[in-house]
Amino acid sequence: MIQKSQFIQRCDVNAKGENTMTGEMTSESNIQSLLEIMAKLRDPKTGCPWDLAQQFDSIVPFTLEEAYEVADTIERVAFDELPSELGDLLFQVVFYCQLGQEQGLFDFGVVVDKICHKLISRHPHVFDAQDFQSSEAMKQNWESLKEKERQARQLHSELDDIPLALPALTRSMKIQKRVARVGFDWNSLEPVVAKVQEEIVEVLDEVNQVPVSQDKITDEMGDLLFAVVNMARHLEVDPEQALRLANRKFERRFRGVEEKVAAVGGVMAEQTLSQLDEHWNAVKQEERDTYP
């Protein structure tokens, strides 16, 4: 059995991916070390109790969390943190592979083979020397290959394989892209914007009903959000990313308001809305002056 010191030695690499003791490239051995670490964590006799208790479904939330942490790191341009976050995400893949191996379903090698085959088959212009005259022709070929894969998996509706677990904004975007492929889409921005405005009116109509139905308001708000995602798609904006950035911007500005209130010895809960709004506008102006 490989010892801890051997794990450390295998993983002791410098920024260039070279073994600091031998100077040799160690990517392959590092992957093997990771697989062995995962197997040791799942050893029935000597493994970690928490890791041993996990199954496919129980680690899904952690996988999603790690993926979002990668996205957050990139959006913050914190590239010094990115290798660590990517490592956390890679560990999730290795965890699934260990579970698959234990149950006789698949292992890490199968996963690598699958993605290699998929990438090669979907890029004939790179690996088969096929020549496409335009990016549009390349895209059409890509969609054709994906459609053949869907048929092979006996997926008949355009919406069959869109994961239910996707974040709602992301899933809305994916649904809209799928139906657009078969022509179910507006070809200009004007009707898209009109639909958003229409949905706002319908939300307000429900709000003004007597008695008010929260279920109907929720339904109309869903339609409004779906329409906003459609507008984002037409503007080539990722709604999930846009909302994450908006959340971060709001948080940054609200912290600025808190700082201004504290600077004059005030308490947030004792401020009037007018006073808070004044601080908010001051923070926004400072941002404009700093980043014009």
Image (cartoon, grey):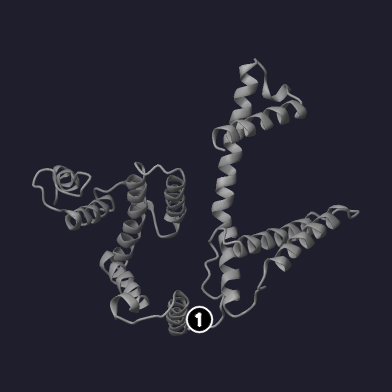
- Number of marks in the image? 1
* Pointer 1 residue: 155
In the rendered view, would you say 137 is above or below 105?
below
SS at mark 1 in the image: loop
Near-viewer residue (194 or 160): 194
Q: Residue at x 67, y 62 (%)?
A: 226
Tag 1: Cα neighbours inside 10 Å, few (<14), some, or many (≥20)? some
Determine whether, in the image, residue 42 is placed left or right of residue 191. left
Residue 105: tell me if it is visible: no
In the rendered view, would you say 266 is above or below 171?
above
Measuring from the top left, give residue 286's x and y in whole percent. 60, 30
Determine whether, in the image, residue 258 is placed left or right of residue 206. left
Determine whether, in the image, residue 27 is placed left or right of residue 98. left
Measuring from the top left, give residue 65's x and y in whole percent. 46, 50
Measuring from the top left, give residue 170's x and y in whole percent. 56, 60
Q: Amino acid at mark 1?
A: Leu
**Residue situated furthest left in the rendering:** 22
